[in-house]
Amino acid sequence: MIGPSQVEALLDRDALIEALASAMADLSAGHASVPARVAAVVPEREGFLAAMPGHVPSAGALMTKLVSLFPRNAGTPLPTHQALIVVFDPDTGAPVGVLDGTVITAERTAACSALSARLLAREDATVLAVLGTGVQARAHALAMCRVRPIRRIKVAGRDPAKAAALADELSSVLDAEVLPAADYAEALDGADIVAAATHCVDPVVRRDWLAPGTHVTSVGFNPAGREVDDATVADALVCVESREAALAPFPAGSNDLLQPIRDGVITAEHISTELGELVTGDKPGRDSRDRITLYKSVGVAAQDAAAAALVIRAARERGMGEEVTLR
């Protein structure tokens, strides 16, 4: 098995963003095979265990991910998302290797958010708001700095001490001013890009707190609530990985989109584009400097397949074992 520290060392963020662009284009074009995920629900813990198989031709990847999501782990030593990925040879179906999927989930999620920023955020975006203080928040800060000239980062979370700790950590590795914010509203004030990665029940992204032209990425999930308010969703150009995945019933879809559709705030047609359609140019992106844009992620197996393929190839190149093979 390729463990967490090895996966982190083998996964190059710039290469991952490029691989995800191809994978998202495959997905939107119908070339990738990504069945709807199935999940066993653990209602007493508000959690679930999901299976996510996928085949992405552009990555030469065939794999399945088993991922648990337990929001009550927030604030504990355990992450809310924990996962394993099993990779298979796409030519023969033979098992190739087992990877830690927790790091891959964090990194591919952040890299796809960064891809959305590359496609939708203003090119002169320099101020980033990070909402959340966990693994995803850290990964998003690191990834966003790869695609835009971020010079200032404001970090906010439910626990001010954790926000300060994450700000200190990021300050040591990024060429940017990183400061803790007193609350979510303060973090959003003047932000060009928002990276929301929380498990809050009530929305932490509110339209009244956003400046014109902000690009919002939202990856948070809580079965009892949502991360983005109705007004933001209604005003924004909305982008997703997959319309089918975003609109799937619980636990696969997004409350941030399903609830406003249910309540008549928007229709399903308001979801104007998929990432892959922006990559290929099949759909237009930002239509004005002041336009609010929103990338709402639910996570799809094509992302995991692209990331796992990069890890396997890098492991082979570093001579980590003949059992690690991928065409």
Image (cartoon, rainbow, N blue to C red):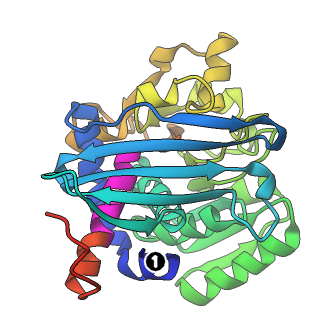
Q: Residue at x 46, y 30 (%)?
A: 245
Q: Amino acid at mark 1?
A: Glu
- Quarter the C terminus occupies: bottom left
Q: Position of residue 82 (x, y in %)?
A: 60, 59
Vertical order, 320 against 287 (above or below):
below
Front-most of residues 327 and 164: 327
Determine if residue 56 is in view.
Answer: yes
Determine if residue 119 is in view.
Answer: no
Q: Residue at x 35, y 41 (%)?
A: 275
- Residue beneath label 1, please? 8
- Mark 1 packing: few (<14 Cα in 10 Å), some, or many (20+)? some
Vertical order, 301 against 326 (above or below):
above
Q: Does residue 240 appear to the left or right of 199 in the view shown? A: left
Q: Residue at x 70, y 41 (%)?
A: 227
Front-most of residues 222 and 60: 60
Q: Position of residue 318 (x, y in %)?
A: 25, 88
Front-most of residues 221 and 169: 221
Magenta range: 301-311
Vertical order, 210 against 161 (above or below):
above
